[in-house]
Amino acid sequence: MNDKFNILIVDDIQENIYTLELLISDNFDVNIYSALSASDAMKVLLEHPIDLILSDVQMPDINGFEFAQYLKDVEITKNIPIIFITGIFDKDEYKAKGYDVGAIEYITKPIDNTLLLSKLKIYIDVYNRLKIKNLELNKSNALLIQSSKMATIGEMLGVISHQLKQPLNLISLYCDDMHYSYKTDDLNDDFMNDFKVNTKEQINYMNKTINGFLEFFNPNKKKEKFNINKAVIESTVLLKDKLKTIGTHLEYDIDESLNCYGVEMEISQVVLNIINNALDVFQEKSIENSLIEIKSFKSGDKIVLTIEDNAGGVENNQIENLFDAYYTTKEEGTGIGLYMAKLIIENSFNGKIEVKNSDKGLKFIIFLNSY
């Protein structure tokens, strides 16, 4: 599929379609689709991404107004602009009806070619400008995603470093003990067997820690069914030392049977971003008895995941900006974490994320499709 502007012509007279196709193709480099009835047009709309519809009003099966109303009621077609082209209705009442069902223009026959071409040029120019803007936005989002990943990797490297220090220290002690035993002629089979078992145990722990880190950031992980609560709990384990240092307690009230579809690591990243945001606020405000409550339950066909802190919340006029890129209420914040959380939930999971002030602090509410 190319990125050309796509026009659908709907008219029950083939000659009219040919005339419009020739006029448009001689003046614009666009894709043109056609249909002899509203029913045929609906089939085209299911197969191709249409950017503009040129439709007759009087058609045998479904008239143009009924066709437009149908498109307006369907999610994937409700925003497609329609230009009515007809020689039957030229009274204001019919034009009003056309505009009411979603028409953006109403051109009467015989067609003024100059007028029609000027209208089409406007819409095609707007489309091309939006396409350029979307490409720029996608590039910006890609950079933000990479920046967020690097920030999370930095956070996790600190965790990994701390987790590896203890087993490395123990192995060092085992080696010192073996050296001492060698000098004192105390080396024997029992000692060497204990040394082997204990050292291997610490090496296995380090290997498991490193593999977990690599798996967490595996860029080739495919979407699959996973347990949402397992992902949440495992991600919070990575913050164990930071939680202990700040003195923050986690409370869970979760339904362990909830499954969704996607990349598990991305949900973990969302949870880490939200919890890290709360932990930073706890530190800045020196909040005692800091608490984060994590709950999950099913509501209809949706999974609802809530994460609530007791950091006091933010000003009401700041709430609507919390998910904006680079917006932050923290002294040393980047404003990327919560923006990334919203991007992941909406784009990767086709879900929804909300935030509000509660009587304790900030409460994040995530809606995901149950699987």
Image: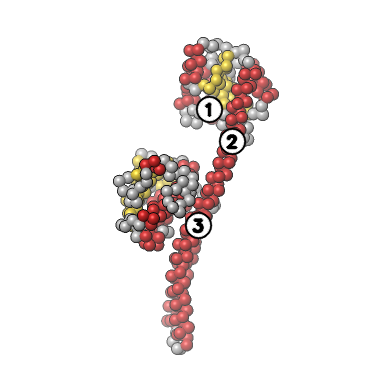
Query: In this view of the protein, which residue sits in the foreground, 195 or 129?
Result: 129
Q: Which mark is residue 153?
A: 3
Q: Which element carries disc 3, helix, strand or loop?
A: helix
Residue lying at 47% horizontally and 88% vertically, measured from the top left = 183
Residue 27 visible here: yes
Q: Nearer the viewer, residue 261 or 286?
A: 286
Q: Which residue is mark 2?
A: 131
Of marks 3 and 1, the one in the foreground: 3
Q: Is residue 207 above or below residue 177?
A: above
Q: In the rendered structure, which amino acid carries the disc numbered 1?
A: Ile
- Residue type (three-letter) at the residue carrying disc 3: Ile
Left or right, 21 with respect to 64, comes to: right
Query: Which numbered disc flags the more N-terminal residue, 3 or 2?
Result: 2
Q: Earlier in the sequence, mark 2 or mark 1?
A: 1
The numbered dot on residue 354 is none
Q: Quadrant of the C terminus?
A: top left
Identity of the residue drawn at 35% across and 41% down: 299
